[in-house]
Image (cartoon, helix red, strand yellow):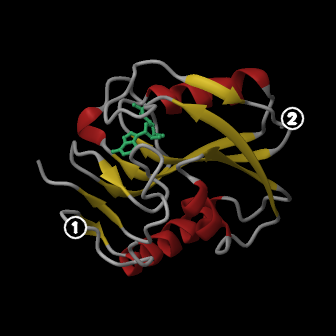
Amino acid sequence: MKALGEKIEGLKVLFTSDQIQTRIKEVADKINTDFVDSEELVVVCTLMGAVLFTSDLIKHINVPVKLEFVKLSSYGDSTTSSGKVKPVDLTLPSLEGKDVLLVEDIVDTGLTANFLLDYVKMQHKAKRVKFVSMLDKACARKYPVQIDYAGFEVDDKFVVGYGLDHKGFLRNLPYIGYFPM
Ligand code: IMP
């Protein structure tokens, strides 16, 4: 069994834990600036991939935060998008008049992000909705989406670690990597 943080055989590291944490602080600084006047920021974490990113990001946010979760699935066990978003749990409290920050792990085709943004904007009368994604696979985009804050841009590779899984595993890696073909 590999120890946490130990390199997995064949896995190439794209972003180290230190790089990720440094970038998260920079992203949080921008969010703090934009929401400086906010009385309440509802941070909506998309399960499961965004859970590590969300938990590190909110530690640096200095306006009052309420944390909520939605659960979606689009990849299943595959390494390519199924082309369909499967809403597993979209239960949210009323966001009327609230500031909302939607948090995703990675924007690939853009399908999931569009689904989520439409859902929050149509169902809830939020005051402001901003969207943050840890990774932006811009070259794979099929459905345009405005990412207000992005951690890192990545090439069209299947990446794992730091919340991102392959068949349910590798989410716990503190770094982000990929398996070269
Ligand atoms: P999209 O709907 O095509 O933008 O895909 C978004 C979702 O697919 C993400 O929230 C991830 O759960 C998953 N995903 C996309 N690319 C990757 C990847 O490279 N590794 C792991 N999961 C991915």
Question: Could you tell me residue 126's position as x and y percent?
Answer: 78, 36
Residue at 42 percent of width and 58 percent of height? 170
Which amino acid does the dot numbered 1 rest on?
A: Glu
Q: Amino acid at mark 2?
A: Glu
Q: On the picture, is 58 further left or further right than 19?
A: right
Q: Nearer the viewer, residue 134 or 38?
A: 134
Residue 56: quarter of image = bottom right
* Residue at position x 35%, y 32% in the image: 78
Left or right? Give the position of 166 relative to 154.
right
Q: In this picture, is 51 found above or below 1?
A: above
The label on residue 96 is: 2
Give me the C-alpha separation between circle 1 and circle 2.
Answer: 48 Å
Q: Secondary structure at mark 2?
A: loop
Q: Residue furthest left?
A: 181
Q: Earlier in the sequence, mark 1 or mark 2?
A: 1
Disc 2 residue lies near ligand 1 with CB under 8 A:
no
Q: Position of residue 20 (x, y in %)?
A: 41, 71
**Ligand 1 has an atom within 8 Å of the beta carbon of the residue at disc 1:** no
Q: Quadrant of residue 15?
A: bottom left
Task: Identify the residue at image location x=52%, y=49%.
Answer: 49
Q: Residue furthest front?
A: 1
Instruction: Specify the label residue 36 is tagged with.
Output: none
Q: Which residue is mark 1?
A: 9
